[in-house]
Image (cartoon, rainbow, N blue to C red):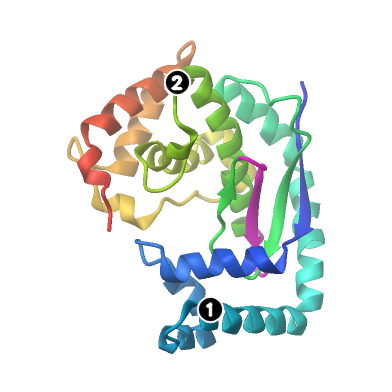
């Protein structure tokens, strides 16, 4: 079976600026607070009236920060790669078995972009994601790698089941995106996968506010996963049932 390799790379300055700016000014869930916790000086951006000037300030800040933490940024990839490579082959093989589809042969690598951003977006078109450079616990870095890598194979399976899906719906705020963000930690908490992680994978806190069938959304869909996953074609059955339930409860996922 073909398996991709996770490679750790530097992130371009322009992309770092663009992504951080987006989370600070356009994220409806208020995730900018996580960036400000790591970079409190960026609070000054909210006192700058014009976008052009905010971008310039952010560009200068990130350049200076990266220069001051050059050694840590360069070392992060090596620090994460060593423990990850011990798990990669077995995890990717197991993930393929659980989801019920093989890794595409035209994708040789998944790019993990070392970032000063504590939020880790993924990019399906290029099979890349950002990863924070200074996690205190290695388990946090491993969880990010496992979670984001899971998305790439998950959406391949999705398109095999629902080939007419507009790929724009794989991004926030669409319902398909919400389901993917629920399913990733559910898979990571599967006992077969959990042995690689050594800790419990986390859900977005916003999902615990949503109730379905008298349970929180994470609890409901976890129970649904357990119901089907041991059966033949269990993941397909789970995903079909989960998608029906998501559509029935679509309004609940209009989270602000």
Q: Quadrant of the C terminus?
A: bottom left
Q: Position of residue 142 (x, y in %)?
A: 64, 52
Query: Earlier along the polypeptide chain: callout 1 or callout 2?
Result: 1
C-alpha separation, residue under disc 1 versus residue under disc 2: 41 Å
Q: Relative to 75, is 233 on the left or the right? A: left
Above or below for 167 versus 253: above
Say which residue appears at 47% left-offset and 88% top-offset.
44
Residue 131 colored in magenta in the image: yes
Say which residue appears at 34% left-offset and 43% top-offset.
218
Per the image, label 1 sits on a secondary structure element best described as: helix
Say which of 66 and 86 sits in front.
66
Q: Quadrant of the N terminus?
A: top right
Residue 186: image quadrant is top left
Say which residue appears at 61% left-offset and 70% top-offset.
17
Above or below for 227 versus 44: above
What residue did someone put label 2 on?
162
The boundaries of the magenta stretch are 125-138
Say which of 22 and 154 sits in front.
22
């Amino acid at each position: 079976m073909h398996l991709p390799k996770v490679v750790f790379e530097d992130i371009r300055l322009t992309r770092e600026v663009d992504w951080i700016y987006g989370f600070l000014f356009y994220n409806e869930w208020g995730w900018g607070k996580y960036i400000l916790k790591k970079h409190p000086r960026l609070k000054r951006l909210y006192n700058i009236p014009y976008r052009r000037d905010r971008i310039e300030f952010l560009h200068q800040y990130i350049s200076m920060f990266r220069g001051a933490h050059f050694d840590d940024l360069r070392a992060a990839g090596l620090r994460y790669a060593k423990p990850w490579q011990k798990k990669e082959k077995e995890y990717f093989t197991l993930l393929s078995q659980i989801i019920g589809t093989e890794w595409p042969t035209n994708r040789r690598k998944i790019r993990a972009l070392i970032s000063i951003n504590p939020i880790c977006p993924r990019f399906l078109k290029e099979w890349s994601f950002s990863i924070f450079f200074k996690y205190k616990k290695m388990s946090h870095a491993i969880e990010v790698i496992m979670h984001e890598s899971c998305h790439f194979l998950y959406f391949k399976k999705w398109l095999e089941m629902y080939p007419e899906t507009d790929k724009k719906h794989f991004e926030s705020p669409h319902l398909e995106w919400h389901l993917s963000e629920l399913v990733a930690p559910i898979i990571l908490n599967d006992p077969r996968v959990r042995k690689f992680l050594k800790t419990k994978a986390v859900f977005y806190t916003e999902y615990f506010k949503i109730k379905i069938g008298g349970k929180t959304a994470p609890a409901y869909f976890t129970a649904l996963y357990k119901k089907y996953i041991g059966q033949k074609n269990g993941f397909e059955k789970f995903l079909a049932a989960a998608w029906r339930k998501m559509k029935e409860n679509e309004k609940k996922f209009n989270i602000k």
